[in-house]
Image (cartoon, grey):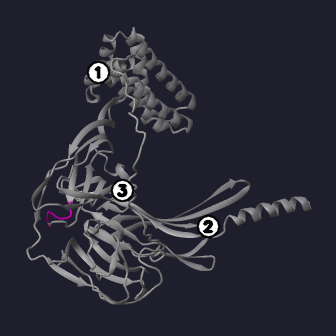
Amino acid sequence: MKKLFFIIAIFFSTISSGFADGVKFSASAPGQVIKGQTFQITFTLINANGQDLRVPEFPGCNVLFGPAVSQGSQFTSINGKTTTQTEESYTYTLKAIKEGTYKIGSATIRAGGKQLTSNTLNLKILPPDKNSDGGSDDDREYVPSAQSSAGTDATTFARLILSRTKVYEQEAILATIKLYTKAANMGLENYTFPSFDGFVVQDMPIQNPQFELDHYDGANYTTVVIKRALLFPQRSGKITINPGKFDMALQVVRPMRGPFGMMRGLQEVKKTVRTQPVTVEVLPLPAGKPASYMGAVGTFTVTSSINRENLKTNEAVTVKLQIKGVGNLKYVKNPEIKFPADFEVYDPKIDVKTQNTTSGVEGVRTIEYTAIPRNAGDFVIPGIDFSYFDVHSNSYKTLTTPEYHLKVEKGTGGSSSQISNFTDKEALQMLNQDIHFIKTGNLHLQKSPSIMWGSTGYWLWYILPALFFIIFVIINRKQARENANVTLMKTKKANKVATRRLKAAGKYLKEHQKEAFYNEVLQAVWGYLSDKLSLPLSELTRDNVATELAKYGASEDLVNHFMEILDTCEFAQYAPSQSDSAMDKLYADTVEAIGKMENTVKK
């Protein structure tokens, strides 16, 4: 009995160790909803038991229900160490009633004797489509991501959005390429971005593209940003940005023939969209540029510092200049420092650290000027003038750094001695010899051997490359002819495409995801028949599929086999209570039917 008690105590102490810190309280909700739609806000408490939940106001919304409370836990064991995570969720169902952008405050809850505060949320309520009834009676639940705008309207387009179209030279423009669709789902298969001729481009990487709702031109679309960049015009005048091209795969809701007549289902559609050409008017910088203008455009500040003002001869002095701000920092010329004539000046060390933001390139440019005095005395290093064009005031501004007074005492060693360790972690060294005497006398020179003209190796150098080139041209032309025949290529690849889809269906089969399994098998069969018979998906019907299969030499049994597979998949979408054995049989029948069709075509 004592042994059993000891084991239970160890088990619960191990589990409780997993509750260590990790207590979190957070809020989540969609970022955009349409007026009249219902949606949910969920407050989640991790690894604690909560009491006295206090939620904020929900501006622009009415509370329909809540809170709905749910609890759950998760156990994980790694290398014998068991951890547990508990979760309490408080869900409110809301209805959007007023358009606008709102901030939802934090919620609070008491847990473990402490009061926890959640994050705030931003909510944008979009107006309904112009052709709708205003959405006041629309109680459909909001579905996040691309599925929120599923419908028969497959309107899809791309936009190039510029933050401004009238700028000065070198003034930053934020360019955004955004895709819009009303399809149920969209995927980007191939693309060509605009070349942005006449601009220097600084890309702003997009880590995880997110689907969002956006209201444009009186309608709501599912959108995604696929490129964001900063453009710096390099010349004045009007510059036209050429269109980009994007090949997309869309899933739209279309009427389909089913076992009970015409029904609605998803169908894949290919579409190519282009961005509109956009013209940017680039103004030349105003006349009257200061002599200290270094090509900087933006908003900047300048600071300087010196590492020492009392030193000895042959010791290095370093002046550090920092230019901070927002603008074209990467393309600014470095100001010059006029060191005294008795100083030996070295090339400056430059370090530029920037980050791309929606307002431009922000960062700091650090320049270190290093010089070595060769004679003793009192010297003055004059201040630096730095001029830039201010985009806010549309005028030139000049910033000046202070001058430095150096007192140089005579040090040990001559000008030819070794110099080191005078700069920040860097060493300077002078070489006392840089010219050597020319060697004279009998040098025993020999003529280098050469390849004998007309030898076997000589001719092979000419024949083998020519032979390889001829073989390459023949193979390349054959491949080009095959690739040019789009119908032939789709027919050849039909089996490969169907195989990939069936692999995905097999995964859903193992996971017992019935609806996804039947949908994937249906798409695989329709896609295979479309490619193999060289017919667009929109023109495929049961009647013409049977006729075309017969033309390919398929037997009546094989045709009926395909029809049975299609019927089973379409029926299962509306009555998904099929057993696992029925799913296994359908998967095997589909593989067998496609294999028989491939053998029929080969014969």
- For badge 3, the amino acid type reads Ile
Q: Earlier in the sequence, mark 2 or mark 1?
A: 2
Q: What residue would you read off at disc 2?
A: 47
Q: Which mark is residue 206?
A: 3
On the image, the x and y values in percent for residue 83 come to: 68, 60
Q: What residue would you read off at disc 1?
A: 473
Q: CA distance from mark 3 to mark 2?
A: 33 Å
Name of the residue lying farthest toward the right: 1
Magenta-drawn stretch contains 447: no
SS class, disc 2: loop
Instruction: Give 388 or 426, whichever is nearer the viewer.
Output: 426
Q: Quadrant of the N terminus?
A: bottom right
On the image, the x and y values in percent for residue 18 come to: 68, 64
Q: Is residue 313 above or below residue 429?
A: below
Residue 229 shows in the view = yes
SS class, disc 3: loop
- For badge 1, the amino acid type reads Val
Q: Is residue 396 above or below residue 434?
A: below
For label 3, the crowd category at 10 Å Cα-Cα, with few meaning under 14, some 14 to 19 and many 20 or more, is few
Residue at x-position 10% and y-position 62%: 236
